[in-house]
Amino acid sequence: MAERSVAERYVIGVDYGTLSGRAVVVRVSDGVELGSASLDYAHAVMDTRLTSGPLAEAGTPISLAPDWALQVPSDYVDVLKSAVPAAVANAGIDPAQVIGIGTDFTACTMVPTIGDGTPLNELPAYADEPHAYVKLWRHHSAQPHADRINDLAFERNESWLPRYGGLISSEWEFAKGLQLLEEAPAVYHRMENWVEAADWIVWQLTGRYARNACTAGYKGIWQDGEYPSSDFLGALNPDFASFVTEKLEHEIGQLGASAGTLSAEAAAWTGLPEGIAVAVGNVDAHVTAPAAQATEPGQMVAIMGTSTCHVMNSDHLAEVPGMCGVVDGGIVSGLYGYEAGQSGVGDIFAWYVKNQVPAAYSEKADALGLSVHQYLTNLAYERPVGDHGLVALDWHSGNRSVLVDHELSGLVLGMTLTTRTEEVYRALLEATAFGTRTIVETFNDSGVPVTEFIVAGGLLKNRHLMQTYSDILRLPISTIASEQGPALGSAIHAAVAAGAYDTIRDAAASMGKVNRAVYTPNTEAADAYDALYAEYQELHDYFGQGVNEVMHRLRAIKRAATRAAEPTGVLS
């Protein structure tokens, strides 16, 4: 439908990423983005030491064990105070013309709070307690707890387990909640709400707590209106039996609905009118699908950044091995929304550049006015497919799909004394594309065909990488026509919540942006990549399907050595 009023109106979309938050001002009538601003989180990601709290301020921060990843919730509020008013100023609009605001968040990112929404880390008694802080999506140390949940669910034939491809992840609400109970019971019992950050930030905007249907379904094991039973949870730990009723269960808000209106306090933070609509929270990946006009069955959207999340709609329910979930209406109403993903993509490339690239490469890149990433890419693609003689596994941050195992690790095979830096870099780029092909083929084989592949996120700027994905997938690659896909998607939801459009599909048709088939497969390269992909599959099954448990054993050795080296002040 057409936008209802000829008067120009605007909405704000706020995207909370892993390292920063960004706001964009969007025109309701056509989705034109008029201004944006971002803010880096002051505490970034705390994955080795707790850099917040009195001990950190005194210069004796608490050390964190491997696989931890924490954040400080006040950093999220700072985005509202800084990036939102800056985006409005950059857009040059009258704030009085803003009719709604929508937000999205990384998931599963959990905030432990007391009853009024105050995070536990803001209570003086818990300011130096790591378990009182936000557990970021990539906090993977709850893997043993996820394993127990999976084993018990399989043993009991729990009806919800197939909805998650047969395995739930250590990243999700229940695994992290069980870890909290068993490693810090005093913190767990003081906590009154176990809140997705996507819902916590909406709570700050409105003064009202509502869970969103997206994170509840994909990360909170909420299926067909029910959570796992207290009987199931009590079998994991007797004190966990009341987890849902005491810590988690709350009103569920539907996507595109209004969660409430902007409070006076939040209006003062943002400079926006008090009382405007605030959309129900959402996940950064899922909210991007409407921004890319991917609201029909078969359109898979890959949001490629530090990690990659793959989302798509289908008109029927199926069991897809290793999927992160399937939720009725999880992306748009009336269709089943599927999710899969890769835990590390851009993070892998960044790790390699930061830790493995000789200084000479940085100096040459600087001389040419290029980033190290672009310089390595240019060098790597001077040679034909397979010339490097390498194949890699993209598991540096574990495997989210289809193996759902964060105890796995990265691997590069085929290195010799003549292997060059850029060749390893290219092998890592290719490995992430092979990981995506594994996901796409799993969906196809399960009766949920992928008919279009659309890329959003910062990595779409790398043209060589996009062509590699097209060749390896043997699919055309479309790209979102926005540099702020999640924020645009949140703005689309804000427009629906404010009543400017009837449905998300309607709003996406007018406000979404996509460039169709920007990249198409090169047959010769695709044939060559097929040979490499066959080797990737061999390694994938050998190390990932239990044939060789060396990666798991190395993780255990690493944890034991860490505890031995720092016996005090380190969380195991």
Image (tube, rainbow, N blue to C red):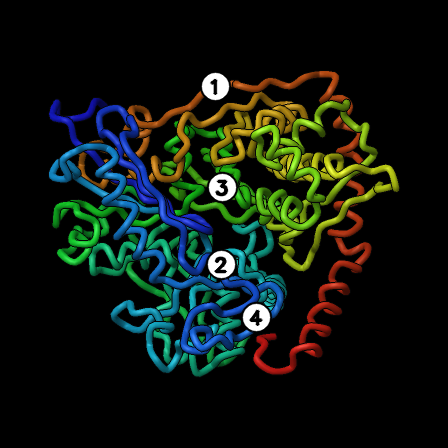
Q: Quadrant of the C terminus?
A: bottom right
| Mark nearer the N terminus (2 vs 4) | 2
Residue 321, placed above or below residue 521:
below
Kind of residue indicated by mark 1: Arg
Residue 107, placed above or below residue 123:
above
Depth check, mark 1 against mark 3: the one in front is 1
Residue 525, placed above or below residue 123:
above
Question: What whole-number distance in Å separates the C-alpha atoms at marks 2 and 3?
Answer: 28 Å
Locate residue 465 relative to residue 415 in the image: left or right: left
Question: For mark 4, does the 10 Å Cα neighbourhood hold few (<14), some (14 to 19), or many (20 or more) residues?
Answer: many
Q: Residue at x 16, y 54 (%)?
A: 268
Question: For mark 1, does the 10 Å Cα neighbourhood hold few (<14), some (14 to 19), or many (20 or more) residues?
Answer: some
Mark 3 lies on residue? 338
Depth check, mark 2 against mark 1: the one in front is 2
| Mark nearer the N terminus (2 vs 3) | 2
Locate residue 7 relative to residue 236 in the image: left or right: left
Mark 1 lies on residue? 516
- Tell me the tag on residue 45: 2
| Mark nearer the N terminus (4 vs 3) | 4
- Tell me the tag on residue 217: none
Locate residue 386 relative to residue 166 in the image: left or right: right
Spot the residue most to the right. 417
Q: Residue at x 60, y 70 (%)?
A: 65
Towards the viewer: 162 or 69? 69
Question: What whole-number distance in Å separates the C-alpha atoms at marks 4 and 1?
Answer: 45 Å
Q: Secondary structure under badge 4?
A: loop
Q: Residue at x 17, y 38 (%)?
A: 98
Towards the viewer: 28 or 224? 28
Q: Secondary structure under badge 3?
A: strand
